[in-house]
Every structure is written in C-alpha cells, then in structure tokens.
Amino acid sequence: MVTVHAAGQLAAPVVYPIGRAASLAGVSVRTLHHYDQIGLLRASARSRTGYRVYGEGDLARLAQIRYYRELGFSLDDVARVLDDPAADERTHLLRQRRLLGDRIDHLARMAAAVDKALEADHMDLAITAEERLEVFGDFRPEDHRAEAEQRWGGEDAYAKSNRRAASYSKDEWLMIKDEGGAISQALVSLMVDGEPATGSAAMELAERHRQHLGRWFYDCPPAMHRGLGQMYVDDERFTASLDEAGVGLAAYMREAFVANAERLEGGSARG
C-alpha cells in the first residue's frame, strides 16, 4: 500500500521485517525462509542491512498460501494454483469457499458417525461384542433407553439403570432376557386366549413386569410403569419390537399396565 502525506507527496510503501511478517501470518520465520528458497513466496525487497522485508502484497499471497495449505494442498499444488495467470483473487476465494463447504460437509458426516458410535457405546456394557450379539441380536437397548429417559424416566432413574446395566455379565443378561421373555410370552398367551388386558391374570403379569424392572434396572412406581406402557404404543420402535412376539402385544401391555397401576394406586389410597 502507498500512503500520501498531507502535502500530497507519496510515502514509502509499508513493509514488514521477516519476524513481523511471520507473526502476522501465524507462521515461523523458518517457514518463510523455506518458502523463499523454493520460490513460493519471495520477499519483495531487502532492508538496507540486507534482511528480507515483506510488502502487503506479499502478506496477501502468504494468506492465500495458508488457506490452501489448511485445505490440504501440497506446496507444489499451492504454487501451481497461485501462479495461474487466469486466476485472480476472487477466483481463489471462490475456490476456497467451495472447498471449505466440501470439508464442512465431510466433517459433519464424520461427526454424525462419531455420534452414532458414541450412542452405541453409551451403555458401556461389561460384555464383549460377541456376547452382546448373542444376548441382544439386532436389538439395540441404547436406542430405546434414551427415549425412555426423555419420556418418563428422569435423570436419576436413567443414571441408576445405566450403572446397574453396565455391571451385568453375559449370564446375567441372559437371565434378564429369559425372565422378560417369559413374561411377554405369558401375556401373548393371555391375549391369544381372549383374556382381557384388564383382568386379574394380565394385571399379575403386568406387576411381574414392573417388579422385573425394579429388580434389574430401576425403581418403577406404578405411574412410571403406566407411562412406559403408553410409550410402548406411541413409539413405533417399541411397538415393532414387542409385536414381534405377538401382533397387538404392545397395546395389550399398555392396557394391563394401566389397569395394574390403577389397582395399586387404589389400594394405596384405601390404605
């Protein structure tokens, strides 16, 4: 840049010694020496004592070098694009904006992949991947637990359940699975036989289910259990998983849970 004195005389261009130029650009003096040696960025002038000094045009080129290097360009590629006679500053900026957009999209996809991996590891189960597959198959408990926390569990119940689940061995998980599966199959049998979900047999199984949760995971008061049954119907993931044992099981369980909760709460009120 050339400045003008008040009297109208042109002032000397602004120049920066190598140390100052390096500091402004956020690079080392050694880097600037290297750029000079390979011809990527030569100082436009020398001081009276022979030291390199950089003008504002030099700093502008240095900024472009840094941008391209941040985008993954090799020094040879940087030299090639910057020395292209058909490319002006706007061309470089447009290219860099497009490349940055591509990188942002790539990083967003990477972040989503990491989030998915974190979600999969959220429970931190004390079993191997092979044992997890044997116990759960394609079922992913963590997909449902986050929804459960949001809908009805609360932070305390969710945290307690996480701590307990993380300590269980493969044998304990198989026991939990068998116990819960037996309850579900008994409910399916009642449903197929035409027994009402509000009947005593279904309510007893609902209570077994509530106690099962309390024994293995978290305290589940009747109101929470009622909310869990509603979620079985509202969330299609729960519905699909439960209805694999028998079409309509999720809705049947909701009715049984509600009836059992009303029975328990009524008994408490009378007591």
Image: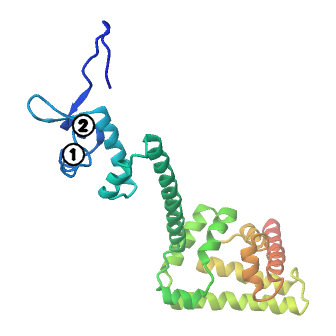
Amino acid on which disc 1 is placed = Leu
Mark identifier at residue 32: 1
In x, y percent, where is residue 244?
A: 75, 87
Please say if 32 is above or below 240. above
Mark identifier at residue 240: none
Please say if 253 is above or below 222. below
Residue at (82, 84) in percent of width and height: 202
Could you tell whether 244 is left or right of 95 in the image?
A: right
Residue at (12, 35) in percent of width and height: 51
Could you tell whether 191 is left or right of 180 in the image?
A: right
Which sits in the foreground, 227 or 43? 43
Please say if 6 is above or below 3. above
Looking at the image, do the residues carrying marks 2 and 1 touch, with CB atoms under 8 Å apart?
Answer: yes
**Mark 1 nearby-residue class (10 Å; few <14, some 14–19, many ≥20):** many
SS at mark 1? helix
The answer to which of marks 2 and 1 sits earlier in the sequence is 2
Which sits in the foreground, 2 or 248? 2
In x, y percent, where is residue 99?
A: 48, 54
Looking at the image, can residue 218 be seen?
no
The residue at which mark 2 appears reads as 21
Which sits in the foreground, 12 or 127? 12
